[in-house]
Structure formats: structure tokens, C-alpha cells
Image (cartoon, rainbow, N blue to C red):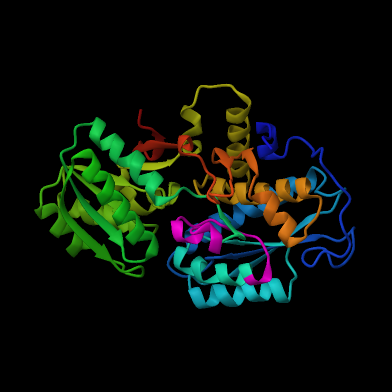
Amino acid sequence: MALTAAVVVGALGLTSCASPETDDPTGGRQGKEADIMIGASLELSGPTQSIGTAYEKALELQVGLINKQGGVLGGRKLRLIVKDNQTKPAQNITNVNNLINNDHVAAVITGGCSACTVPVTTIVEKRKVPLISLASATAITSPVAERRYTFKISPNPAQDAGVLLAELKKKGVKSIGLLNVDNPYGQEGRAAVLAQAKKAGIEVTGIQQFGQEDKDMSVQAKRLVAGRPDVVVVWAVMPAAGIIAKNLRDAEFGGGVYLDAGAGAELFVKGAQGAAEGIHMVFPRVLAIGDVTSHDKTVRAQKEWVDRYTDKYQNYSGFASFGADAALMLRNAIAKAGTTDGPKLRDTMETLGFDGVSGPIRNTAQDHSGLQPESLGVLVVREGDWHLAN
């Protein structure tokens, strides 16, 4: 089902509003007029709380827009129930169990912590409740045969690495150093970068890792700089990405610095302070939508979303697009399925296609990570803001 770009910001009402079932096992136990419960377990404290907070703001805004435009299934409203997973896998497990067992949610959204999300995929599989993750690791949705009820929005590490190394090869870069966080997200990113670097004929002069809760990576930065690479590739979320940028500056590194999509978007610019200028990142182009001159419906809708978010929260978070698209995916799937029944909702989500805030999303039975590669671009910090590099 390809939706028009206007759907991205809730500008149009839904035309598929089948009568809801009154005996749905999740999300509809209080009758056809009841709110549809949507659970979210996000990093509202802990090392990645800044990202989780951006997700929460985006979800609240998008759910509010959906409800303002008439909700779903003949006027039922979505009700968002948010819990803090503290960036801890054990707490995320507790939250997801509570959302399903006590809050009777129709679906669950989890945040950017890949290590927190992977353990709960078995829970939703057993309970037959769809889950949408905002984290990046491929293991969240793969193998699909074991993750039938799990979907995700953000790009796969292999997609990020492919775009990043293609850019470096085009620029004639001969060598890179690599610094990644030592968790599933970082390890997968490291493997993807090394594979793409080998394919591109780019030498890797050094590889360093750091712990998820480390607050200084100056030792690793100095070791990488000693290898004299042309570029340092950083695979890290905030606040670590910002700290690393400052560590590299303090180590007097004069080459380029390239980040993956987890780095934090506007959070990185703020966290890295003066060290952010000139740094590159692979990310959905919507973060630099002001540089896009096209006037097609999708671009206009993306700009409207960015304006709405900025008006409400005074600045724009790059991560907001992922949260917005998670809410849209659920709204569209519920409307198309005509029910909040878990298995039927899952079946619908698996073949769902729409133009989201992040870019085109096309789920298939073989791939539950539907954000398309053409959504991604290379961005650069100029005068304290993200712009398209090319």
C-alpha cells in the first residue's frame, strides 16, 4: 500500500476504516470505542537518554496528529503508554512484559538500544504482539523466521557503511582508522565498515573500541591518530560520539571524521561543541531538508513535519523521523488490517509500504527493516548545523 506523502504528517484522513473487532486479544478489550493502547519502552535515563527523549517527543507529537485527524478504525484514538528502560536490557524486558500483560497494548515500540531490544523479540514472538524497534542492529529483525513479529525503522549498519565507504572512495581516501562502541550495534558496524573498506581498497590503519558507558576515549583517539589515517570512522551514539570528536581534536587529528547514523544528529552538534564543525555523518536526508529544493509531495510533507516538531520543541532532532514513522506504520497497519488482532496486524505490517518522514519504507516477508537505502545521504556540519555534503 503506497501512501501519499501527505499521510506522513497526518494531513489526510484515512480511507480504509474497517469496523473494529470487539474481541481482539490485544489493544481492543474494552470494545470498539475504546482507545487503542500503544506501548513504548524508551531510554529516558542512562547513557542514551538524550536519544530516548527525542523518540518520546516524536511519538507524542505524531500520535497527537493522528488522533487530531480522526484516529483509526472509525474514530478510535491511539493512546501512548511510555516506560523508561533506563538503557538496561533487563529493565526493557520488564517493561515489555508489563506493557503486554498489564496494559494490553496492541503493539510495542522500543528505543535505540540494540542490546535492550534483541532479548524482547522472543517475548513478542511468544505473545504474538507486533514490535517496532528504533534501534539499528540487524539482529533485531534477522533471521526473519525467528523475528516474525519484529520490525524496525532505522537503517541497517550495512546500509550506513555502504554509503559511507562509497563516499570515501569517491573522495580518494586511502586509509581510515575505526573507533566503535563495544556492543552489538558497534560490533556489527565494525564488521560492515571493514568489509566495505576491503571492497573499496581502503587501508584500515587501526581499530579501537570503547565501553558503552565510557566517558573518555582519549587513549583510543591517540592510538588511532598515531596510525596517521586520512579519515577516522566513528561508530557510536551520543554522548560518546561528541566526546570522541573532542578527543580527536585534542589529539590534533587533522583528517576527516565520519559518523554513522547513530551519532546523534543535532545532539552531536551540541555535544561536540566546536569540534563538530566539518564532521560528516551518514543519515536520512530529512535532517538537512532545508537544502532540498524539490517541491514534490514527499518533500513538502517532510518539511511540514520538521516545522511542526521545531515549533513544538524549539529545535529538530534527527531521531524524530524514526519515532514519527513508527507511529505511522502502526496507524497504517491497523487501518489496513481493520483490527488490532496481533497476528493479523503482523501480516499486514509485513507487506506495508509508505512514504515516511525518514524516507520510503517498504517491508517484505524477507526484510522487516524497510527503510530504503535511497533515504540516506552524507551530511556535514557547517556553521553549527547539518547540511547535505553534496
Coordinates of residue 306 in the picture (x, y in percent): 58, 39
Q: Is residue 278 visible?
A: no
| Image position of 214 with respect to 243: above or below | below
141 part of magenta stretch: yes
| Image position of 186 with respect to 163: above or below | below
If the image is split into quadrants, where does the N terminus sit?
top right
If the image is split into quadrants, where does the C terminus sit?
top left
Q: Residue at x 38, y 48 (%)?
A: 158
**Quadrant in the picture for residue 214:** bottom left
Say left or right for 51 vs 275: right
124 part of magenta stretch: no
Which region is colored magenta? 126-146
Q: Residue at x 90, y 63 (%)?
A: 31
Say left or right for 14 vs 141: right
Coordinates of residue 19 in the picture (x, y in percent): 89, 50
Q: Residue at x 58, y 33 (%)?
A: 303
| Image position of 328 with respect to 101: above or below | above
